Image (tube, rainbow, N blue to C red):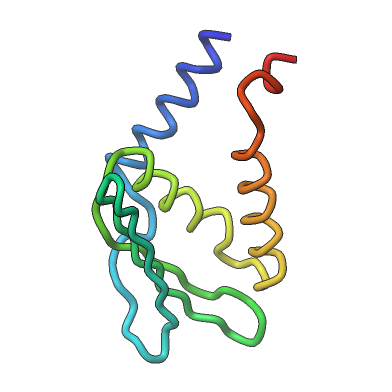
Amino acid sequence: MAGLEDLYREIILDHYRNPRNRGELETPPAHMAEGFNPLCGDEVQVFLHVNGDTISDISISGQGCSISQSSASMMTTAVLGKTVNEARQVIRAFKQMMSIHGDDLDG
């Protein structure tokens, strides 16, 4: 299991050090949403271009810990090119996965 944990750690650090789709898209035409965690101060802004029903461009900006910033980067790569409904399914699956208690993951 340590090998898998090291791989996950390396992926998180890679996205933190080299964030994908970093920057801001001009609004409008891009849509922008932002989130702020008052407990730790993490903040993220997400910019989307939607062409028809497909996410044709996405970018992020903000600041925070390595987990918040790398997960935002990973999210951009997961939803770019997907339809809005497909992106919502990805987000729902992620939220469901994050709501599992650690005891349930031990098998």
Question: Is 64 on the left-hand or right-hand side of 6?
Answer: left
Q: Which residue lies at the image location 48% right of the left edge and 58% below the top edge?
A: 76
Q: Where is residue 1 shown, x and y percent of the image?
A: 58, 9
Q: Nearer the viewer, residue 41 or 7?
A: 41
Q: Which residue lies at the image location 51% right of the left edge and 8% below the top edge?
A: 2
Question: Is 32 on the left-hand or right-hand side of 56?
Answer: left
* 52 lies above or below 68: below
The quadrant holding residue 98 is top right
Q: Residue furthest front?
A: 39
Question: Is 89 on the left-hand or right-hand side of 95?
Answer: right
Q: Which residue lies at the image location 55% right of the left edge and 64% below the top edge?
A: 80
* 31 lies above or below 61: below
Q: Nearer the viewer, residue 13 or 96?
A: 96
Q: Nearer the viewer, residue 47 or 102?
A: 102
Q: Where is residue 75 shown, x and y percent of the image?
A: 50, 53
Q: Where is residue 90 shown, x and y percent of the image?
A: 66, 55
Q: Residue furthest right?
A: 107
Q: Residue furthest top?
A: 2
Q: Which residue lies at the image location 32% right of the left edge and 41% below the top edge?
A: 16
Quadrant including the C terminus: top right
Q: How many numbered marks appear? A: 0
* 74 lies above or below 1: below
